Amino acid sequence: MMAVSTDLHDILLQKLDIRAIAAMAPNGIIGNNNSIPWNIPEEMAFFRRMTQNASVLMGRKTFESIGHPLPNRRNIVMTRNTAWHQDGVTTIQKLDQLVELAIKGPLWVCGGAMIYEILFPACRELYLSTVFGKFDGDTKMIPFGSIFVIDKTILTCSTFKVDHYVNRRYANIKESPLFL
Ligand SMILES: NC(=O)c1ccc[n+]([C@@H]2O[C@H](COP(=O)([O-])OP(=O)(O)OC[C@H]3O[C@@H](n4cnc5c(N)ncnc54)[C@H](OP(=O)(O)O)[C@@H]3O)[C@@H](O)[C@H]2O)c1
């Protein structure tokens, strides 16, 4: 069952420009053995282009699968382990810490599944690549139909397509007096 939007999610929706970006196979698989089960350089290039010079937020497992901070981006990693530190990385243990980080520009939520589950309700938009092919794995995209509604397909090529979704609640939040 999908997490329900909370007051904190609404506050984050108002205060920060949080966006999610993800790639999945047609069967919903997003990962296997703590890595990505495909190697599609043009999809990686899309991810790089979208997140360049912005902030990225990921779970500790995804960070460790990459092994280093993503260059030219402010790297934020979520972990419950207060002793976990890496050079060039800001760590948070709780979502409300995001408000204190003075994030400029968009904050891109980059996965994995646990972090999508926690953050999707606070994301204004989702950019979701579907990679063409058959891939098996152990980590699936979470159900998100109650949170996001499709806007349009923004890119299609021979190996993947990208669909843009918008948060169903964001339009209401924008009109709330609290937002002004
Ligand atoms: N296809 C894609 O777009 C994509 C994108 C990203 C990742 N992936 C794949 O997804 C897989 C990893 O996903 P995952 O869901 O297993 O792990 P994850 O979301 O990357 O990281 C999970 C970790 O985040 C921390 N965390 C989770 N909930 C938390 C909370 N409420 N408070 C504080 N910290 C919390 C915990 O770290 P601690 O254990 O340190 O406390 C937890 O172990 C890999 O296969 C990766 O390659 C795919």
Image (spheres, rainbow, N blue to C red):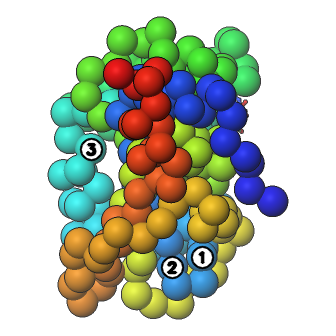
Kindly identify the amino acid type of the residue bearing the numbered disc 1: Gly
Residue in view at x 51 percent, y 60 percent: 148
Q: CA distance from mark 3 to mark 1?
A: 22 Å
Dots 3 and 1: beta carbons under 8 Å?
A: no
Question: Position of 67 compared to 135: left or right?
Answer: left
- Between discs 3 and 1, the one toward the N terminus: 1
Residue in view at x 35 percent, y 21 percent: 180
Q: Which residue is mark 1?
A: 28
Q: Quadrant of residue 161?
A: bottom left
Q: Quadrant of residue 158?
A: bottom left
Q: Quadrant of residue 32?
A: bottom right
Q: Which residue is mark 2?
A: 25
Question: Position of 16 compared to 113: left or right?
Answer: left
Closest to the observer: 96 or 138? 96
Where, quadrant-wise, is the N terminus in this rendering?
bottom right
Instruction: Count numbered badges in the picture.
Output: 3
Dots 2 and 1: beta carbons under 8 Å?
A: yes
Q: State whether residue 173 is above or below residue 112.
A: above
Question: Position of 25 compared to 105: left or right?
Answer: right
Q: Which mark is residue 51?
A: 3
Kindly identify the amino acid type of the residue bearing the numbered disc 3: Thr
Q: Residues within 10 Å of mark 3 (few under 14, many from 20)?
A: many
Q: CA distance from mark 2 to mark 1?
A: 5 Å
Return the x and y of residue 49 as percentages of the image width and height. 18, 52
Kindly identify the amino acid type of the residue bearing the numbered disc 2: Ala
Residue in view at x 58 percent, y 57 percent: 147
Residue in view at x 30 percent, y 34 percent: 106
Q: State whether residue 148 is above or below residue 88.
A: below
